[in-house]
Image (cartoon, rainbow, N blue to C red):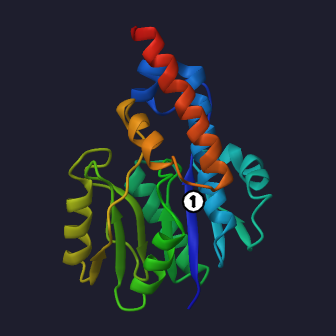
Amino acid sequence: MEASLVLVCKRPILGIGKQRLAASLGVEMTQRVAKALLTCAVEDASNWSGPVVIAPADPLDFEWAQALSAPISSPVTVLPQVFGNLGQRLNALDQTLRRKEMKQLVFIGSDAPGLCAMDYVAVKESLKCHDTVLIPATDGGVVLMASRNEWPELSDLPWSTNQLGAALVESCRTAGHYVDKLQESYDIDEPGDLVKLKEKLALDTRPARRALHELTCGIISMMHAANA
């Protein structure tokens, strides 16, 4: 059975999202970072061998999401998210896509540039013998969540906290899922994450990652100059 990649994303808009970054970098630079991160996620979608779903947060961004799919050669479905907290939105996406006969769903966001081809291969392999596969984040969250079963109720989970990963595992196991956790990765939420990002992407040759690395190096240099 072919797995589908679901990119859950927001349109990078000045002053919207990544508030912890914006507090240090300002809204314009934060928007540039958000755009570069999203380009990395689209890069991953472009290399995905199965169906791709782009799920923009705002239904008004349907055409924007369609344009985002231009470099993706696989079949692409654009399905805007419903309103509600992240758990409610993921549950609604999951249920709608399963009704469309997409049975193995791999959810990613747009702020985990550390994901690589081997991670996706490992997820697909693990789904052959597990119901649910998660890639934890170093901060206690998750950077990828995949399942061949419908997700349990997610609305009450502690989203955007360091308790999310453990709570998600417990919720899935309580629902009877056989869960596998793969090697952890990282996401970008705090200014300090940029230093780690610079190190992690130093040898990455993927074009979107090279562009993000260059942007990150410039930001760090600028921050050092401002603090000198």
Residue displayed at 24% across by 78% down: 175
Classify residue 197 by image quadrant.
Answer: top left
On screen, 110 above or below 44?
Answer: above
Whole-percent x and y of residue 185? 37, 57
Query: Which amino acid is tagged 1?
Result: Leu
Whole-percent x and y of residue 133? 36, 75
Classify residue 178 by image quadrant.
Answer: bottom left
Q: Mark 1, residues whose alpha carbon is within 10 Å: few (<14), some, or many (≥20)?
A: many
Q: For this view, does 72 lie left or right of residue 42?
A: right
Residue displayed at 57% across by 70% down: 5
Quadrant in the picture for the C terminus: top left
**Foreground pick, 155 / 215:** 215
On screen, 81 above or below 94?
Answer: above
Residue displayed at 57% across by 59% down: 7
Residue displayed at 61% across by 79% down: 100
Number of marks:
1
**Foreground pick, 200 / 141:** 200
Can you name the residue that lies furthest to the front here? Answer: 203
Whole-percent x and y of residue 45? 64, 64
Residue 11 visible, this angle: no
Q: Which residue is mark 1?
A: 7
Whole-percent x and y of residue 35? 63, 39
